Image (tube, grey):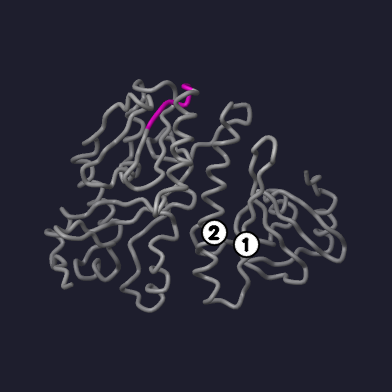
């Protein structure tokens, strides 16, 4: 099909909308971008394991905007993001209503891009006073966006249920995690204190997303490098439901690309260690070098023998 792409920026800028996707979506993009610079999609990190992209909303089809489009229009990626936000602002609350069945706010966006509203600064913060406590949102797939209040435990519980179910059942899910707003009005991942009643499930949502996206990233990137990409592992306590992520690193394979995890399991001739990510960074500061990937991976350099012994001494019991 011959798709009529606008030739001028003046025409294109009114057709742009933002899109929130997993950082590994669309699946074909990584390979396509390697083959041709012009295919590189206009994207930027939005939240952990999520990206913001720009789409061209044509009468019969929607396309992800790429570098080739920007070159044609003579504009930058920042110009495209700004224009997409301006278009979305014009109908940011279209379809917003209170869902009496679930007792939360829901956006039934006529454009089918409900979750895109989360990229608009101040959109989620506008629920201050409409919900109990900090506004919290779920975006399990692109057409479903719901908002409740963090101080309403029943609302949070329903949001978690819907987010988890949507993540399992959607053909192309976005995220099972919960999000809130910072002081500047930007949407950020919801982080709660361990004493919060729903803390365990909230944290599990973020780790479930990380597990899935890192696995997709590994599958896409590994064929193009001789360096091993380590797999992120997810464990869930059978009684408490508490989830944590970990990654294995061995002296026999000193250089790998590690995903960021809660814990690192180190294996060496000197012994084994089970340490937090922060402990590894503190005791062996030159062991990890961040790569230009989203979500983040780190090129490794095996610690010195002195650092290895320090890590073993700092090792935590593994339950």
Q: Secondary structure at mark 2?
A: helix
Residue 237 shown in magenta:
no
* Crowding near the residue tagged with mark 1, few <14, some 14–19, many ≥20 C-alpha atoms within 10 Å: some
Check disc 1 and report the residue beneath it: 231
Instruction: Relative to 46, say whether 201 is above or below.
Output: above
Q: Position of residue 255 (x, y in %)?
A: 68, 70
> Considering the image in quadrants, where does the C terminus appear?
top right
Q: Is residue 134 above or below residue 69?
A: above
Q: Is residue 151 highlighted in magenta?
A: yes
Q: Position of residue 135 (x, y in %)?
A: 41, 29
Q: According to the image, label 2 marks what residue?
A: 214
Q: Nearer the viewer, residue 191 or 289?
A: 191
The residue lying at 81 percent from left, 48 percent from top is 314
Query: In this orientation, which residue lies closer to the viewer: 316 or 115?
Result: 115
The region drawn magenta spans 147-152
- Where in the figure is residue 30, as x and y percent of width and height? 42, 69
Q: Is residue 304 above or below residue 273?
A: below
Q: Which mark is residue 198?
A: none
Tell me which numbered mark, 1 or 2, is placed earlier along the sequence. 2
Whole-number angstrom distance, CA of label 1 to CA of label 2: 7 Å
Q: Secondary structure at mark 1?
A: loop
Determine which quarter of the picture holds residue 242: top right
Find out whether the residues at labels 1 and 2 contact each other: C-beta distance under 8 Å. yes
Looking at the rendering, which quadrant does residue 286 occupy? bottom right
Residue 58 is situated, as x and y percent measured from the top left of the image, at: 17, 59
């Amino acid at each position: 099909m011959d798709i009529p792409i606008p030739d001028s920026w003046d025409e294109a800028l009114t057709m742009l909308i933002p899109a929130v996707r997993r950082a590994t979506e669309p699946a074909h993009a990584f390979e396509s971008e390697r083959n041709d610079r012009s295919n590189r999609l206009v994207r930027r990190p939005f939240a952990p394991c999520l990206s913001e992209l720009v789409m061209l909303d044509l009468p019969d089809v929607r396309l992800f905007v790429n570098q080739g489009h920007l070159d044609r229009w003579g504009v930058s990626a920042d110009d495209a993001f700004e224009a997409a936000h301006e278009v979305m602002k014009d109908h940011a609350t279209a379809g917003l209503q209170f869902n009496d069945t679930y007792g939360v706010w829901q956006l039934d966006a006529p454009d089918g891009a409900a979750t895109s509203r989360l990229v608009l600064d101040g959109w989620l913060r506008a629920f201050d006073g409409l919900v109990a406590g900090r506004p919290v949102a779920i975006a399990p797939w692109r057409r479903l966006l719901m908002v409740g209040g963090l101080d309403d435990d029943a609302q949070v519980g329903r949001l978690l249920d819907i987010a988890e179910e949507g993540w399992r059942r959607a053909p192309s899910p976005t995220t099972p995690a919960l999000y809130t707003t910072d002081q500047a009005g930007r949407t950020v991942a919801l982080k709660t204190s361990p004493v919060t009643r729903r803390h365990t499930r909230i944290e599990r949502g973020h780790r479930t997303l990380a597990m899935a996206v890192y696995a997709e990233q590994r599958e896409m990137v590994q064929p193009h490098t001789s360096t091993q990409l380590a797999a992120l592992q997810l464990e869930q306590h059978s009684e408490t439901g508490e989830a944590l992520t970990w990654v294995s690193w061995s002296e026999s394979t000193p250089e790998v690309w590690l995903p960021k995890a809660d814990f690192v399991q180190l294996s060496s001739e000197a012994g084994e260690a089970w340490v937090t990510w922060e402990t590894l960074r503190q005791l062996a500061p030159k062991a990890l070098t961040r790569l230009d990937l989203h979500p983040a991976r780190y090129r490794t350099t095996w610690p010195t023998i002195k650092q290895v012994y320090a890590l073993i001494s700092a090792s935590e019991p593994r339950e």
